Image: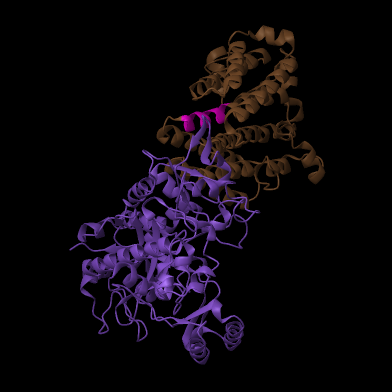
Amino acid sequence: MHALTLPETGHFDEMLLPSGGIRPHYRAFAHWLQAQSPSVLAQKREQANQLFHRVGITFALYGDDAGAERLIPFDTIPRVIPAAEWAKLEAGLAQRVRALNAFLEDIYHEHRIVKAGVVPGEQVFANAQYQPLMQGVNLPGAVWAQVTGVDLIRHADGGYYVLEDNLRVPSGVSYMLENRKMMMRLFPELFARHAIAPVDHYPTLLLSTLRRASARENPTVVVLTPGHHNSAYFEHAFLAQQMGVELVEGRDLFVRDDHVYMRTTAGHKQIDVIYRRIDDTFLDPLAFRPDSMLGVPGLMQAYRKGNVVLANAIGTGVADDKSIYPYVPEMIRYYLGETPILDNVETFQCRHPAELDHVLANLERLVVKEVHGAGGYGMLVGPAASRAELEDFRARLIAQPENYIAQPTLCLSSCPTFVEAGIAPRHIDLRPFVLTDGRETSMVAGGLTRVALRAGSLVVNSSQGGGTKDTWVLEE
Amino acid sequence: MLSRTADHLFWMARQMERAENLARLLDVSLAVSLLPASRGGADVSAPLVLTGTLDAYLARHGEPDASRVLAFMSFDAGNPSSILSCIRHARDNAHAVRGKITAEMWMSINATWLEAREFAQGGAGDQAFFDWVKERSHLFRGATHGTCQRTDAFSFIRLGTFIERADNTARLLEVKRHLLDDADAADYYAWSALLRAVGAFEAYHALYRDAPSGRRVAELLLLRPDMPRSLRACFDEIYKWLARLEGDNGRAAKRLAAELRAAQAYTSVDEVFDAGLHDYLTRMLGDITRLGALVHEAYLEAA
């Protein structure tokens, strides 16, 4: 019926054993799959497409025609994670987020980790993501990142590794929720056969995290969006609706006497917590970019006075910068006195001459990334690059080594995925979303699985042809 | 509710209502254009006059020609008053507040936009298209009625619908005024077309059991409270939805709405004709515009 094939050697496949057999946690699914006719499954995929279009679960591409919207391709073969694996991931993620928040509290106050020589001072204070305005600002509960998205990959050795942390405005959680809804709609029988951990309480968890971020009783929470041209607008609207809070744009808000208000049909209403989906530098034209039309003049002043909470805080970008990433395991040891549960991917910092030499000598085997890049832009995948691309990057590395890090070409695990000619292995990653109020860390089981739909591709970003899958964490 | 949200909801409803009204008008224009000129046919410029796009049309296409007018008013994306443009504006407004409307409302209006684009690929506006537009408008209204919570959001949606409808009914009568002015020179076909445009053909015959006359058509569409597209019914609704809005900042709008409603309720058709239909309609159109501006000032402006 459906031919399942192994990936090229050296990759871990989520469903298939190297022998070609089915891994235990995928057996029930594989059994079901083989009983489905290809034409019925094709119909279901078409149905999913139409529904996503109708619901308008689309994203806008930067640089594309104004208003052009695309669907993120959705694959109907789920990524399945056994309970024991998830338990370890969950502990590792919570640990990491605790350490990152402790790091932010420290570098905006006492700089203990720098003084102790664990993280070099210039990496922190000369970093463009470091916000001097935040030095000495006390935040409720000392929470800097209420919401963190951690990108994980599974390597050839079967272990999970952290590829990067996202502490600014991580997106994708709406796709996690909509993918689950779609799978339950298309294949209800699968959910009867498996004990799959639910995810749809995420908005409730998020709202209670945001409410606890304020010291005020019964705080007013809003979601701040750049507007409907933003690529993640669907998600902003979705989360606001699911939480039952207002979705505001900068022009809906104003600051008076260092308090923030929104304009409503019944007059002005004070705001206590802003779940902002706008980058730091656009938040307040008085404090940052004077040309920003998205922000709220005076917001920074109200924020520094403690009259409004921003989630996440301003200045968190320094902790997820690729130049700081190599130090996260050290942070865990330093702040928590614990052994890191999740490992980093081996990373070469081109700012160190010896490591730069190694990178230049092995360029065609490495992945080179811009330290401040995001979204899969500004990166070189050595093995897939042309001679000209390699030479271009070589020149860039020599000119500005401190702008780059390099990592071995990752063996992202693969998962069987529908492609034009049946089912084929495609590379995937995983982005769980971790919430914290400073005392407790919470998350829903799983996260967003992204899949690189082109054969052999390792780039899973939706802006570059990536798709998504539903992610199942099986309960014991 | 955010002022901006109210603004999007109001215009979402207005643009959808506008698309429906245009479809009604074009549907009738198409029918009338097939009549001989002696029976009121060949009056193909009415949709252009009514939407204020006659000059734009003349500049681009020259003499009005039935099929070209239909295409211009149905699918021309460069014409901000075309049905396609109205649907796009309605959908864009809904998109901007999609978290504030129900999933079913959003899916209905989004699907309308997606399918309208496909219709537009097909070329000329025809009866099948106009029927489809009316159906989609009914569907959206149904989804709104059946799923939308009765908060201020609903009030702003209804307000948008009825301000637009009042404006449209008044304009439609103004454009066809030459038929009404001469109160007894009834032309069966032209009257019938007008009544069909506002879905009042059956009601007219049930009420008057007689061939249409100008005075009766005017009475039906201006003064009868039980005709859902009459000016009177629109003013009743506008008054009702405005009165429900919280807050004091809408006093001026609420007062004008109450005045218009009372005036419409206690006017007879003879008074309308004695004063002159044109003057009457001109005053109504001015009042409706003023009401829209007051609503904007009080609730919708993000100032």
Q: Does residue A337 appear to the left or right of A127 in the view shown?
A: left
Residue in view at x 43 percent, y 81 percent:
A347
- Residue A412 percent location from the top left of the image: 38, 77
B142 vs A58, nearest the viewer: A58
Give me the chain that's purple: A
Residue in view at x 63 percent, y 8 percent:
B267
A141 vs A376, nearest the viewer: A141
- Residue A221 percent location from the top left of the image: 43, 43
Q: Is residue A470 visible?
A: no
A77 vs A406, nearest the viewer: A406
The magenta span reads B152-162
Residue in view at x 72 percent, y 41 percent:
B69
Residue in view at x 68 percent, y 47 percent:
B76
- Numbered disc total: 0
- Chain B colour as displayed: brown
B179 vs B168, nearest the viewer: B168
Q: Does residue A101 appear to the left or right of A301 in the view shown?
A: left
